[in-house]
Amino acid sequence: MDTIVVRGGSRLRGEVAVEGAKNAALPILFAALLTDEPCVFHNVPQVVDVRTALRLLADLGAEVQQEGTTVWVRARHLRSVEAPYELVKTMRASFLVLGPLLARTGRARVSTPGGCAIGARPVDLHLKGLQKLGATVDVVHGYAEAEVQRLQGATIYLDVPSVGATEHLLMVACLAEGSTRIEQAAREPEVVDLARVLIGMGARISGAGEDVITVEGVSRLHGVEHTIVPDRIEAGTFLIGGAMTGGDVFVRDARADHLHALLLKLKEAGAEVLEDAAGIRIRGHTRLRSVDVKTMPYPGFPTDLQAQFMAAMTRAEGRAVITETIFENRFLHAVELNRLGADIKVQGNAAVVQGVEKLTGAPVMATDLRASVSLVLAGLVAEGETVVSRVYHLDRGYARLEEKLRALGAWVERRRE
Ligand code: EPZ
């Protein structure tokens, strides 16, 4: 198990480029199961979750090739319609193969994901939606078993605008007979990117990015070539890093239209934000001001930037209240940040962060992907050395993070234990 060692004190300066979005790439790779023709995807991030997705596709019988950030997938013949517990346990997004396998072959058996460090994360909306589309779905021995003769379009109302359920049902609806309406759909840019891919494959979709998506089913989909949208969460992570270290960073390919809520909050905290077509430049000043944030579905403040923003608030001037409304247990980083000298009190779904003058380096433990990176960011402003263990969480979603931070002038090193 690797650790990341950070020595605090440097201001981040320079330019960094973001990868393609992991959370767009995963459903998009699985969408390749909907056709027997080749699909080519560019700007696919080289992160562990993508490797897991490619392994799953290969296990199912798809031909997979990868050259740098370009991936070629052809699901000409499927060898299996099952995704085992081992893979779904490693990466929850694997559950999204259930629908495409079902739409393509009429049956599928995929392990249900169970809870995870940030919350219970049920998949009831996915299953109910598939049933609405005419499938028989049973959960037996921990597996969702689905069967269908012919998928039928339907109106589906999502109780919460779940990103995964929207993506899952969108993929399936493309091959259903007749029209489907997904109401209270998630509006995240990753959903829109998936819709673009599906449209490129011949699907008839309108409204992606809005809260009602309509799909006119087609009888088959064909191959596609697509470039994955830039990762707004990785971009946001570097922007927060630039702001909290009092640095000056140009984040190439960061899209201001995808980061509206974060940029407003960073400006409110006193950072200077300059947007242009090629990316976003951030300039931080000596000490940020505390600002409150509340996570919300897109276009609200993303839960996937909550931990990083909390790290920035630990040394800000004043008191910030951070409210998490998406996941019920996404504050595990708070206790680790407190080990660095932060003053955070968690009360239910709110964390009260009283800004302190300084943080001091210490050994800390990563609990999930975004928590891991928040500890690295905190390490950048802590005195002395911070050693972040369990960085396998971080490797699931960030490519070459140490390298990128070093290029911005930080002292960061990976150690093999
Ligand atoms: C996606 O997870 C992302 N993962 C998450 O990113 C992200 O935090 C999350 O969306 C919210 O933006 C991927 O895209 C692979 P949801 P997902 O379904 O789709 C409840 C990261 O760090 N819910 O939108 O699983 C659920 O419990 C990760 O990159 C149900 O109740 O999230 C949660 O409270 C972590 N029933 C809320 O909805 C369901 O059937 C939102 O979850 C489905 C979800």
Image (spheres, helix red, strand yellow):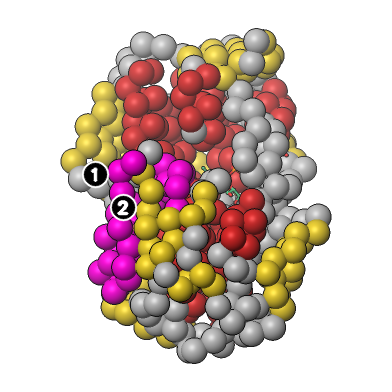
Which span of residues is magenta-colored? 388-417
**In the image, residue 159 above or below residue 151:** below
Q: Earlier in the sequence, mark 2 or mark 1?
A: 1
The residue at the point 54 percent across, 46 percent down is: 368
The answer to whether one can see residue 277 in this image is no
Displayed quadrant of residue 71: top left
Q: Is residue 294 left or right of residue 24?
A: right
Point out the image quarter for the C terminus.
top left
**In the image, residue 130 above or below residue 358:** above
Q: Where is residue 315 in the image (x, y as percent from the top left)?
A: 58, 77
Amino acid under disc 1: Thr
The residue at the point 61 percent across, 23 percent down is: 112
Image quadrant, ligand 1: top right
User: How many numbered discs sit on the rendered protein?
Assistant: 2
The 10 Å Cα crowd at callout 1, few under 14, some 14 to 19, many 20 or more, is some
**In the image, residue 334 above or below residue 2:** below
On whether residue 275 falls in the magenta region, the answer is no
Q: Is mark 1 on a helix, strand or loop?
A: strand
**In the image, residue 117 above or below residue 191:** above
The residue at the point 26 percent across, 28 percent down is: 64
Disc 2 target residue: 414
